[in-house]
Structures are given as structure tokens and as C-alpha cells.
């Protein structure tokens, strides 16, 4: 497995974890006992998710001529 393939797997895994953390944070914020820090966590995770997706797209375009093997 190439470094490119491993890198793509890690970017996808990080994006999914960031997404799930954001969903959890927003659910905690909107719960009756929600804390304002959960809103900050949720917004931060959205920013992180967008950054990870932009980086993944940049990475794929930069290394499109290198194989996955």
C-alpha cells in the first residue's frame, strides 16, 4: 500500500471522526443540560471538517499522477 493510499485513508477517517464529534457536540448543546462550550466544540468541528475536506481535495489533485499501489 502506498503512502498516498494510507494518507487518503487517514484523511477520510479524520473527517468522519470530526463529523461524529460535531454531531455529538451539537446534540449535547441542544439538550436541556447543554453547555455553551459544546456549541464552541460543534462549530470548531465544522471548521475542522471543512479544512480536512479541502486538504484532501488539494492532496488528491497534487498527487493525481501517482498510483495507489
Image (cartoon, helix red, strand yellow):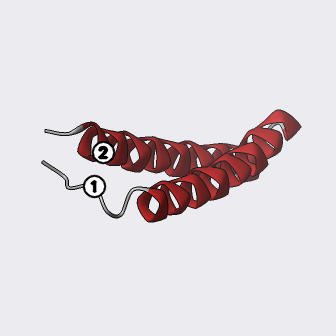
- Residue 13 x, y percent position in the rendering: 37, 43
Q: Is residue 33 visible?
A: no
Q: Vertical placement of 17 versus 61: above or below? A: above
Q: CA distance from mark 1 to mark 2?
A: 8 Å
- 69 displayed left or right of 25: left
Which residue occupies 57% across, 45% down?
24
Q: Nearer the viewer, residue 35 or 10?
A: 10
Q: Are marks 1 and 2 in contact (CB under 8 Å)?
A: yes
Which residue occupies 55% across, 42% down?
21
Which residue occupies 74% across, 39% down?
41
Q: Vertical placement of 12 versus 35: above or below? A: below
Which residue occupies 49% across, 55% down?
56
Residue at the front extreme, as displayed? 65
Of discs 1 and 2, which sits in the foreground?
1
Image quadrant in which you'd find residue 63 = bottom left
- Residue 46 x, y percent position in the rendering: 68, 54
- 35 displayed left or right of 69: right
- 11 displayed left or right of 43: left
For residue 43, the mark is none
Query: Which circle's residue, 1 or 2, is located before the other in the chain?
Result: 2
**Under tag 1, what secondary structure?**
loop
Q: Nearer the viewer, residue 49 or 33?
A: 49
Q: Which residue is mark 1?
A: 66
Give the class, few, some or many, for how many residues have Cα within 10 Å of label 1's Cα (few <14, many ≥20).
few
Give the class, few, some or many, for how many residues have Cα within 10 Å of label 2's Cα (few <14, many ≥20).
some
Q: Which residue is mark 2?
A: 4
Q: Nearer the viewer, residue 46 or 5?
A: 5
Amino acid at each position: 500500500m502506498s503512502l498516498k493510499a494510507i494518507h487518503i485513508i487517514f484523511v477520510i477517517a479524520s473527517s468522519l471522526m470530526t463529523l461524529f464529534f460535531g454531531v455529538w457536540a451539537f446534540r449535547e448543546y441542544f439538550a436541556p443540560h447543554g453547555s455553551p462550550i459544546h456549541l464552541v466544540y460543534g462549530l470548531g468541528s465544522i471548521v475542522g471538517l471543512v479544512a480536512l475536506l479541502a486538504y484532501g481535495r488539494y492532496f488528491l489533485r497534487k498527487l493525481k499522477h501517482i498510483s495507489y499501489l
